[in-house]
Image (cartoon, rainbow, N blue to C red):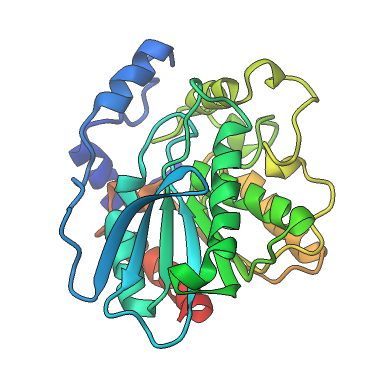
Amino acid sequence: MPMDPEVIAGIEADGRFTLGERGPEPTLELLAEMRAMPPRVPYDPVPPPGVEREERELAGVPVRIYRPAPPPARPAAALVWLHGGGLIMGSHDQDQPFLDRLVAATGCVAVSVAYRLAPETPYPGALDDAFAVLRGVRDDAPALGVDPDRIAVGGSSAGAGLAAACALRARDEGPALVHQHLVYPMLDDRQVTVSSRWDLLAIWPREMNAFAWRQYLGPRYGTDDVPAYAAPARAEDLAGLPPAYLHVGGLDGFLHENLDYAARLAAAGVPVELHVFPDVPHAFDVVAPEAAVSRRATALSDAALARVLS
């Protein structure tokens, strides 16, 4: 299928992915090599004007808290943010530029979670970490300068899947959330949709997706004993969830599981904003941030968050 030429150029310049060719078989050795790769954008320890950061633990989980500086006179909305990486790699450092920009633009408090990764910590480790932080933000709201009635959760890729799982668990156990922000979320371990079976997918091929789910789920993988908190696409009841924003590329292996989840949210009465960007693969905005399609996606995502968090 044709791909956006600006995104092709970004993939080729990145050098970590091949187009139209099958990559190496995913193994734990390959995972170790991928984890050791330098980040695309190095972490900048100096926050921009108007933003301050704090490294601490919240509910026993390492987090980085981004706050407006000086702090606002009234409690701010909060966003608990979860990084991507297939539940097996990545770091909360990778979202530093985005969260700096978001806090400066909206005046919210953003809490970026350094959740534990599989296979060292399989399910429910990452979810337990994310949900503990979500509750910690609610419980420590006065000290954090946060309005406990204006808490949102979000993430990209695997982090968006964790955000969807947190939204399900928060609906069932509290706290109430005002928004779930799902950027090409990783939702379904079964790989039964049309797009999940596409061959030679760029960025995140089906072989790597299956490997990641296997590491996260352990002996549950390939069985029916996978709870919705592990793979939100398995949730039978989506009623009562917070309003959702979701975007995905038209060449993403997650395309159809994302479309199905958005449709089911809408059918359950949940307000949904959905965008599909044709001719781009998974994480297109990461490998080609200056592409016109990436700028459109970023603008729409930023605007949706600003409506909730400003």
Give x and y (percent) for residue 106: 39, 78
Q: Residue at x 76, y 35 (%)?
A: 227
Q: Quadrant of the C terminus?
A: bottom left
Left or right: 165, with 34 as reference point: right
Q: Residue at x 38, y 78 (%)?
A: 107
Say which quarter of the image contains residue 151.
bottom right
Say which quarter of the image contains residue 273.
bottom right
Q: Which of the pair 48/41 is nearer the observer?
A: 48
Give x and y (percent) for residue 184: 52, 50
User: Residue lying farthest front?
Assistant: 143
Left or right: 112, with 187 as reference point: left
Give x and y (percent) for residue 290: 24, 59
Position of residue 160 relative to residue 195, above or below, is below
The answer to whether any part of residue 287 appears in the image is yes
Left or right: 235, with 166 as reference point: right
Q: Which of the pair 109/266 is nearer the observer?
A: 109
Q: Residue at x 49, y 53 (%)?
A: 155
Q: Residue at x 76, y 20 (%)?
A: 223
User: Residue lying farthest bottom?
Assistant: 73
The answer to whether any part of residue 4 appears in the image is no
Say which quarter of the image contains residue 177.
bottom right
Looking at the rendered structure, the number of numbered marks drawn on it comes to 0
Position of residue 280 relative to residue 192, above or below, is below
Give x and y (percent) for residue 170: 70, 56
Q: Which of the pair 170/305 is nearer the observer?
A: 170
Q: Which of the pair 38/184 is nearer the observer?
A: 38
